[in-house]
Image: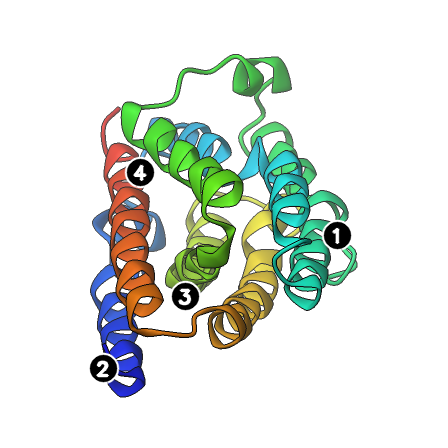
């Protein structure tokens, strides 16, 4: 696969799996989602990208370090944002989800921590672990997933603050991610340019990205089931 074909296939995947107009996102944006839908969103997303984010990025850093030190540095920057909210000057992303659950939905944190996510959410989380641990060269796939939800987060923020009586502070999880995921998507592009070097690696990256983005979308599909 030549580089021009590679870039085109990545653009096509990005377009195919973009979540801006996913049915769940539209439900929230239009004020048609129920409270149970919003709870389900939190449970599924917490499992997919939040609960293990710190450990995942730390693992990715350790695996990337012998492969590419500059790439490892970029992963460490993402870790600093996920765990601490360092670059958006907000809070760790788990803490932001806790704010949404506790202050937006008025629910005890123990309920979120002890919730049972869908098989789809578990599968997406497992795929991230697999990439971080066994295939760190393809970690730019995570940036693609985060890019696919950027516009969706903007609509989620508008929806929950307009239709569900939530304050901007309680919905910071969404507004912060609009900014953070732009940075993470750009980091993903840089990691691709730096680490994916030949025909085989380009084919493998496209295959891995297709799996990850499909699993991510199925995680959002699961949010519709209440």
Quadrant of the snapshot with the N terminus: bottom left
Colour scheme shown: rainbow
Report which residue position mark 4 lands on. 219
Callout 1: SS: helix
Q: Is residue 69 left or right of residue 159?
A: right
Report, in whole angstroms, how far the alpha carbon at label 3 lies from the one at label 1.
23 Å
Report which residue position mark 2 lands on. 5
Asked if the residue under mark 1 is in contact with the one under mark 4, i.e. CB atoms within 8 Å, the reply is no
- When the figure is inspected, residue 129 is found, relative to residue 174, above or below; the finding is above
Q: Quick one: label 3 or label 2, which is nearer the N terminus? A: 2
Report, in whole angstroms, how far the alpha carbon at label 4 lies from the one at label 3.
17 Å
Q: Residue at x 77, y 47 (%)?
A: 84
Q: Quick one: label 4 or label 1, which is nearer the N terminus? A: 1
Please tell me how crowded label 3 is: few (under 14), some (14-19), or many (20+) other residues with Cα within 10 Å. some
Mark on residue 151? 3
User: Which numbered mark, 2 or 1, is in the foreground of this view?
Assistant: 2
């Amino acid at each position: 696969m030549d580089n021009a074909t590679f870039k085109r296939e990545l653009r096509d995947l990005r377009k195919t799996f973009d979540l801006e107009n996913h049915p769940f996102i539209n439900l929230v944006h239009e004020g048609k989602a129920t409270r149970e839908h919003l709870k389900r969103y939190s449970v599924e997303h917490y499992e997919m990208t939040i609960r293990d984010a710190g450990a995942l990025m730390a693992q990715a850093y350790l695996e990337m370090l012998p492969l590419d030190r500059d790439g490892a540095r970029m992963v460490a920057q993402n870790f600093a944002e996920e765990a601490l909210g360092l670059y958006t000057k907000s809070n760790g992303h788990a803490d932001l989800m806790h704010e949404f659950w506790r202050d937006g939905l008025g629910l005890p944190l123990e309920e979120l921590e002890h919730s049972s996510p869908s098989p789809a959410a578990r599968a997406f989380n497992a795929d991230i672990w697999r990439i971080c641990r066994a295939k760190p060269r393809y970690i730019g796939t995570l940036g693609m997933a985060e890019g696919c939800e950027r516009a969706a987060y903007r609509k989620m923020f508008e929806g929950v603050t307009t239709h569900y009586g939530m304050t901007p502070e309680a919905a910071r999880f969404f507004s912060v991610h609009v900014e953070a995921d732009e940075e993470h998507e750009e980091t993903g592009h840089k990691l691709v340019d730096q680490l994916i070097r030949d025909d085989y690696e380009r084919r493998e990256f496209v295959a891995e990205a297709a799996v990850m983005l499909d699993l991510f979308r199925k995680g959002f599909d699961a949010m519709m089931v209440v």
